[in-house]
Structures are given as C-alpha cells and as structure tokens.
Image (cartoon, grey):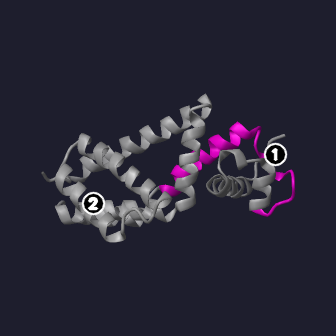
C-alpha cells in the first residue's frame, strides 16, 4: 500500500536527491533514503511502488525546487530590458542552480540513469522541454532582446558552465565564470 502523507513523501524525495548526489544512482536504495531522511527502516518502501517510482519523483522534484520564487520574477519583470539586466538575470540563474548543488548533481545522475529507464527519460524529457518552453515564453513576454534560439543557446551554455562549476570547481575561477556569463549574453543576445 502506497502512503499519502504528502509532507513525508516530499521529505523522502528530498532525501533521495541527497542520496543521488552523494552516492549516485547505484547508491539509491530505500534503506539509504530512510537513513538520509532519518525515518524508520521500511518507510520509503511504503511511499514508493518501486525504485523507478522513486527515481522518477526525484527527477520531477529537482525541477520544482529549482524554480525562482514569485518575488524574484516580479523584480525581473520590473527591470529594464538591457544588457545589464540580462546579464544580472543570467548570473542569478547560474547562482540559484549552483546553490542547489545536490539537486543539480542528482539531476546529472538521473540523466545518466534515464538512458536506461524509459519512464524516467519520459519524465525528464517532459520537464526539460517545459523548462525551456517556459524560459522562451518568459523571455518573449518580457521584452528582452534576443529570440528563442538565443534562450536555448544560453540554456545549453550555462548548463555546462554549472556542470563545470559543481564537478570541477578549480577549472574556472569565480571571476572567469562571471566574465563568461557576461560574454555569453553579449555575444548571443546583444551581438
């Protein structure tokens, strides 16, 4: 029987994200999730039908937690549509995603696991497409310069910049990362 306590389920999914980030997909077991969530043994198995269910819910949860809050969105919409604002938005995005280190590392694990699990691949594909579509729609509605292709190019470039920052942080200094964000905005959006 699958349990319905939504707060407990969210805590277990968050624990699964932490396990994925620390131990990888192979380390993700119900027992490891129970330990990470500090709940009695067997709790996770009461909330998830199987490991695939847990992986899929973890993938969806990472994207939920990466969304900006309403206050940030309101501030962004009120700002001028210029290179300075655009650069600030991109720095905020890179910083927000990088700040959820365990979530992003878990997402990388999930992406690799998705190459072998069609249900997980479907969930992640849907979430990534929705994320890109939302970014394009926000961009087009904001009056910021650039087109959908620019948004997609920045999405791809900054995803790899974040991977670099989280997995090999000594490759680029913070100042270099800042310069690269500025250069990407200036070359892709304001050529």
Q: Position of residue 114 (x, y in %)?
A: 58, 35
Residue at 72% x, 52% y: name it.
9
Q: Nearer the viewer, residue 31 or 169?
A: 169
Give the left or right position of residue 2, taking residue 54 as reference. right
Q: Position of residue 169 (x, y in %)?
A: 45, 64
Query: Which region shows up in magenta?
Result: 37-66
- Where 136 falls versus 9 (above or below)? above
Sort mark 2 into few (<14), some (14-19) or many (20+) by Cα contacts within 10 Å.
some
Residue at 21% x, 43% y: name it.
147
Which residue carries the number 2 mark? 180
Q: Position of residue 47 (x, y in %)?
A: 78, 46
Asked if residue 55 is among those painted magenta in the image, a careful observer would answer yes
**Quick one: SS at disc 1?**
helix
Placement of the N terminus among the 4 image quadrants: top right
Q: Nearer the viewer, residue 44 or 68?
A: 44
User: What separation in Å lies between label 1 and label 2 (alpha carbons)?
Assistant: 45 Å
What residue occupies the far front of the structure in this picture? 171
Which residue carries the number 1 mark? 45
Determine whether label 1 and label 2 are within 8 Å by CB: no
What residue occupies the far left of the structure in this picture? 191
Residue at 68% x, 53% y: name it.
16
**Quick one: SS at disc 2?**
helix
Sort mark 1 into few (<14), some (14-19) or many (20+) by Cα contacts within 10 Å.
some
Q: Position of residue 148 (x, y in %)?
A: 25, 41
Image quadrant of residue 156? top left
Q: How many marks?
A: 2
Label located before the other in sequence (1 or 2) = 1
What residue occupies the far right of the structure in this picture? 41
Give the left or right position of residue 89, taking residue 32 as reference. left
Give the left or right position of residue 83, taking residue 18 as reference. left
Residue at 19% x, 48% y: name it.
146
Asked if residue 86 is among those painted magenta in the image, a careful observer would answer no
């Amino acid at each position: 029987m699958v349990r319905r306590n939504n707060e407990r389920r969210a805590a277990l999914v968050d624990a699964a994200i932490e396990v994925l980030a620390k131990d990888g997909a192979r380390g993700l077991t119900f027992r490891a999730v129970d330990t990470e969530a500090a709940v009695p043994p067997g709790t996770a198995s009461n909330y998830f039908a199987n490991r695939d269910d847990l992986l899929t819910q973890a993938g969806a949860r990472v994207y939920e937690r990466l969304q900006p809050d309403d206050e940030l969105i309101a501030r962004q919409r009120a700002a001028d549509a210029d290179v300075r604002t655009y650069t600030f938005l991109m720095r905020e995005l890179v910083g927000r995603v990088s700040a959820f280190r365990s979530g992003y590392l878990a997402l990388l694990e999930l992406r690799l696991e998705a190459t072998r699990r069609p249900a997980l691949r479907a969930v992640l594909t849907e979430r990534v497409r929705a994320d890109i579509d939302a970014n394009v729609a926000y961009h087009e509605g904001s009056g910021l310069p650039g087109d959908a292709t620019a948004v997609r190019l920045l999405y791809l470039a900054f995803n790899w910049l974040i991977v670099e920052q989280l997995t090999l942080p000594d490759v680029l200094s913070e100042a270099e990362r800042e310069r690269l964000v500025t250069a990407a905005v200036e070359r892709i959006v304001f050529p």
